[in-house]
Amino acid sequence: MLTNNKIKLIKSLKLKKNRESHGLFVAEGDKLVQEFMDSDFVLESIYTSNSKGYPEAVKVSEKELARISNLKTANSVLALFRIPDSSLQLEELNNKVTIVLDNIKDPGNLGTIIRIADWFSIETIICSKETVDVFNPKVIQSTMGSLARVRIYYEDLPSILNEFSVPLYGAVLDGKSIYKRTKLTEAAVVFGNESTGISAEIFNLVNHKITIPRFGGAESLNVAVSAGIICSELIGKPD
């Protein structure tokens, strides 16, 4: 049964402070919910207007599902999952490529970058504490399930980057062309804020500044587009 208290709880999870206090986030839609259920994420509860496929689910009406949905048009299933409690271990970064995000604000950009990481088998993304919350419903939906396979950490970037033993690359406008770089096998690549780029404090820590050469008149590229191009060229290229 979907009680009024449960409805209030689910709706309250739109806010970061409530997600943190309850340790829960919302996922909606068959594909997304199934991706999380097949991963290490812990299912708290599940609600569906479709009796097939989810024997553990609470059966609700389409009207009830619409009340608790974050979407304009509700899917047939909504689930609550536990926010994992994990801490970054720097040895995780050895012999791998890691993405670092400095103050990314747009939920769609973060979700897309997580999907890009999943596509190129990048296991870890490290975010500044100012970056949009990964458990924001808009981020969750835009990951299309890739969050189930990519670990996300929020850290004080200046402190943690000073401890890195892997080369640190920064995506900037005036760096060395990515087409003149060899394939990366062990590195961390920093992408900056949508408007202001990489902050000065982080910029000073970057060992290698890289750029996507510009041939036209556009002032800049969307950060998620840049991440896709750079990952394709420096990670996905043949040996």
Image (spheres, rainbow, N blue to C red):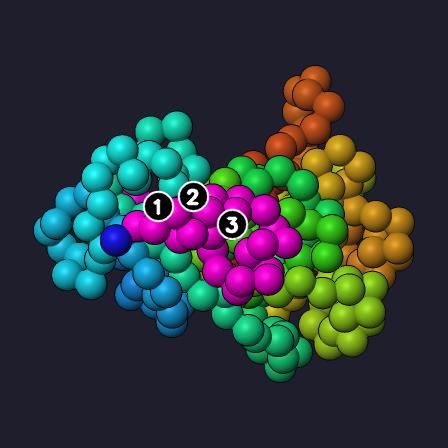
Q: Position of residue 213 (x, y in %)?
A: 68, 35
What is the x, y in percent for residue 48?
23, 48
Q: Magenta: predominant secondary structure element?
A: helix
To which residue does mark 2 refer?
Answer: 141
Count of marks, rendered view: 3
Q: Is residue 236 visible?
A: no
Task: Verify CB contact (< 8 Å) between mark 2 and mark 1.
Answer: yes
For disc 1, the marked residue is 28
Residue at image location 74% in from the left, 51% down from the top: 130
SS for dot 2: helix
Residue 16, which numbered label? none
Q: CA distance from mark 3 to mark 2?
A: 14 Å
Earlier sequence position, callout 2 versus callout 1: 1
Residue closer to the observer: 79 or 239: 79
Start and end of the magenta stretch? 2-31
**Residue picked out by circle 3:** 13
Kindly check if marks 1 and 3 are in contact, taking CB atoms under 8 A apart as contact.
no
